[in-house]
Amino acid sequence: MKIQLDLFKLCNEDDNKEGRIRALFNPELRKEIRYLVKEIKSKDVKLKEIAEELGTTYTTLWDYLVRTKSIPLDYIRKIVQIWSRTTGNSHEKKIAEIQKMIKRLSYGSGPQIRSTNAVKELSRTLCKILGAHAADGSMRKRYTKWGGKMVPHYEIRFREEYEDNIKALTNWINKIFDINVKPKDKKNHWYIYISNKILFRYFHNIFGFPNGRKCEIVEMPHLVRNSSKGCKKAFVTGVLMFDGSVERKTGYVSLFCKSKPLVSDVSSILMGLKIEPDYINLEPDKYGRFRFIIRKKEKRQKILKNILEPQTTKWLRLRKTLN
């Protein structure tokens, strides 16, 4: 059974008008929102009263029902709450039904509008992205002055030595979220820079990654921890691709990391896959790092076959040493 993601967790109470994350209307979604409002009105509640409870105007609500291209996610949630309260029907069931109807999300206004897929399930590809972010990603929310007011920017960065790893990650992100991310070369490394509030909220609000420094505290998201073996394995793929190593001479596979929880999490998943590390040190070295090493050939063969992304540098190096 796949784990469902709650799109409504992408909302923050302090989002302003332009900053709200919205669901793009499709015929099915608009029809359902109109139906809910009609049901509420049948209980002697006026459209103006619904608008006031949403914190908007009668005209704006009418526009959402008739002609706008999108509607704020938090308005959908409040409409369902009003509907549930006035009709006595299940709030949770209706929210789940509506979430299935949402296909695209957007935010911003005018030429600054950006949209992504509405990702509603925890997939293996998404878990690879989460593993890569846990290993080597960073997030920062910063403010710049624009039009006389301070405007937030939501930034996600990945930095990596190997071009093939960063290209694989780019393909995963573009496939899942349908955004146009491109890797860039900067002298001795490759990197991805993403300025996207929706992705930032996925990582922060849904998966619990912190804003700012995380290298000592990052861990496997709870949703991944409670997921299938395949999703956990995909998370390890992302971690080892971006923070693991394959030694050139021996082919030993290792993970050196300043986060004790992450080293412990990855070790536990590998044990569940019958790839128990040959050496684990959960005491920090002089650089504050924790680590595990996989030496035995049969275990490294499993890493090659089941964990590392085929045809990437570390995969090719491991195959060469095994042969």
Image (tube, grey):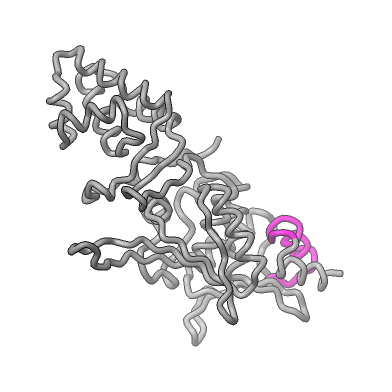
Q: Is residue 305 magenta?
A: yes
Residue 272: x %, y % from top left: 63, 54
Q: Is residue 68 above or below residue 276?
A: above
Q: Is residue 249 above or below residue 31?
A: below
Magenta residues span: 293-310
Q: Quadrant of the C terminus?
A: bottom right
Residue 88: x %, y % from top left: 24, 18
- Which residue is rendered at x = 56% and y = 69% of the image? 184
Residue 239: x %, y % from top left: 57, 64
Of residues 74 and 51, the one drawn nearer to the viewer in this rendering: 51
Residue 7: x %, y % from top left: 39, 41
Q: How many numbered circles are shown?
A: 0
Left or right of 268, for residue 51: left
- The residue furthest right is 323
- Which residue is rendered at x = 64% and y = 58% of the image? 271
- Which residue is rendered at x = 32% and y = 24% of the image? 33
Of residues 77 and 323, the one drawn nearer to the viewer in this rendering: 77
- The residue furthest bottom is 286
Of residues 148 and 270, the one drawn nearer to the viewer in this rendering: 148
Q: Is residue 276 above or below residue 31?
A: below
Q: Quadrant of residue 40?
A: top left
Q: Quadrant of the N terminus?
A: top right
- Which residue is rendered at x = 22% and y = 49% of the image? 16
Q: Is residue 106 magenta?
A: no
Of residues 263 and 119, the one drawn nearer to the viewer in this rendering: 119
Left or right of 255, for residue 258: left
Q: Is residue 304 above or below residue 207?
A: below
